[in-house]
Image (cartoon, rainbow, N blue to C red):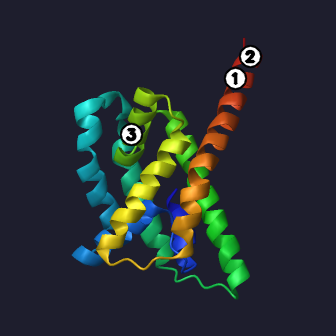
Amino acid sequence: MGAGIALSVSTGFGSDPLAMFWQGISNVFNISIGQSNLLMSIVLLFIPLLISQKELGIGTIVAPLVIGQTVDSILSLNLNYPNMIISIMVMLLGLAILALGAAIYIYADLGKSSYDATLCIINEKTGISVGKVRSLGDLLLFVASLTLKVNVNLAPFVAIIVVGPFIDVFLNIINNISRRRSQVNV
């Protein structure tokens, strides 16, 4: 997930609205995007702690650390792309990697980040797919980010449209592969 976020951010087009929100927090508090991720993870942790701790586990602690460090490390490489077409392709690849990472992370069920745990709680309580809940959450984060002096770029708009549905597609693929493997092993 961190690699996807960093690739998308490195294009200059931004990333998903959650990373856009991290950038806003980063600007306001003069901290790195990775540190902003950790701060938001701690703040958002209260929702699953109060509603459903079953979404929490070792991944809740490890993921923000790994994602934050990955984002900061890749962004420190100061990647440059030769033209806008390559930049757009890298942005799309980054968003796809983010969605795939989120699907694997959700499926593994080793504890979700506070944001993903909140999305899964809403999914469980309403029956709305994780992807649709993610798209709605991303839209809300996008609006909130506008209050944090963040430059509006292309990627958050694209992410609102594609990341949630890609998560649903990847979760379906992972579930199908898992079912086939369990049928073969029986």
Q: What percent of the width, then of the height, locates residue 126? A: 44, 29
Rendered position, 158 above or below 29: above
Secondary structure under tag 1 reads helix
Q: What percent of the width, then of the height, locates residue 40? A: 29, 57
Q: Is residue 182 found left or right of 154 in the rendered image?
A: right
Rendered position, 61 above or below 52: below
- Decide: few, some or many residues near mark 1? Use Cα within 10 Å; few <14, some 14-19, many ≥20: few
The residue at 26%/59% (across/down) is 39
The reply to whether discs 1 and 2 touch (Cβ–Cβ < 8 Å) is: yes
Task: Give the quadrant of residue 66.
Answer: bottom left
Residue 183 — which label?
A: 2
According to the picture, the residue beneath numbered tag 1 turns out to be 179
| C-alpha separation, residue under disc 1 versus residue under disc 3 | 24 Å
Name the amino acid, label 2. Gln
Residue 117 — which label?
A: 3
Q: Is residue 38 found left or right of 174 in the rendered image?
A: left
The residue at 69%/23% (across/down) is 179
